[in-house]
Image (spheres, rainbow, N blue to C red):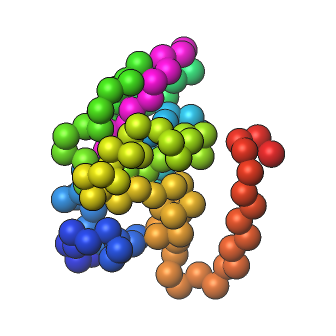
Amino acid sequence: MGPRVKDSRLLDRGSDWSAWAVTVAGIGIAGYSCADALMQLGANVTVVDAGDSERQRERAEILRALDATVLLGHDGPLPKATDLLVVSPGLPPSHPLIHEALALGIPVWGELELAWRLRDPDSAAAWLCVTGTNGK
């Protein structure tokens, strides 16, 4: 396990994530994958989503089995222990969770920021990022 850091600017794949309480907003494809990757690194993960569909419940069941906390139908405030908020691409910048996190000084990352931080530092793979709405 890597060094323990409390400054999000220093977090990467080799860091000790066990001291970090990360809230992932959204349990769609991106949010589910972010939560899975963070749990593999040892982070304490809470996933929140305002929805409560059958597909979301299936994903929640898997993440809970891996020891994540999942709050479906959650339209409330940011969980109290949050050190970092990772947002899915479908969450608009005006979303209350984002505003709350920023007001509290909690870093907010998108899934691309997380992926960049978790990339293999020894890999010379080039990155090409295409922006747009989900499904394009």
Find residue 134 and report its horizontal and vertical position in percent: 71, 42
Query: On the picture, is 58 further left or further right than 63?
Result: right
Find residue 46 and report its horizontal and vertical position in percent: 32, 39
Find residue 77 and report its horizontal and vertical position in percent: 29, 32
Could one spot residue 72 in this view of the protein? Answer: no
Q: Residue at x 54, y 14 (%)?
A: 54
Could one spot residue 3 in this view of the protein? Answer: yes
Q: Is residue 46 above or below residue 113?
A: above
Q: Quadrant for residue 92, please give it.
A: top right
The stretch of residues the image draws in magenta is: 41-54
Q: Is residue 43 above or below residue 77?
A: below
Query: On the picture, is 101 further left or further right than 131?
Result: left
Find residue 99 and report its horizontal and vertical position in percent: 39, 46
Q: Which image quadrant: the N terminus? A: bottom left
Q: Residue at x 53, y 55 (%)?
A: 111
Query: On the picture, is 19 further left or further right than 114?
Result: left
* Residue placed furthest toward the right: 136
Q: Which image quadrant: the C terminus? A: top right
Q: Is residue 58 above or below residue 88?
A: above
Residue 62 is inside the magenta segment: no
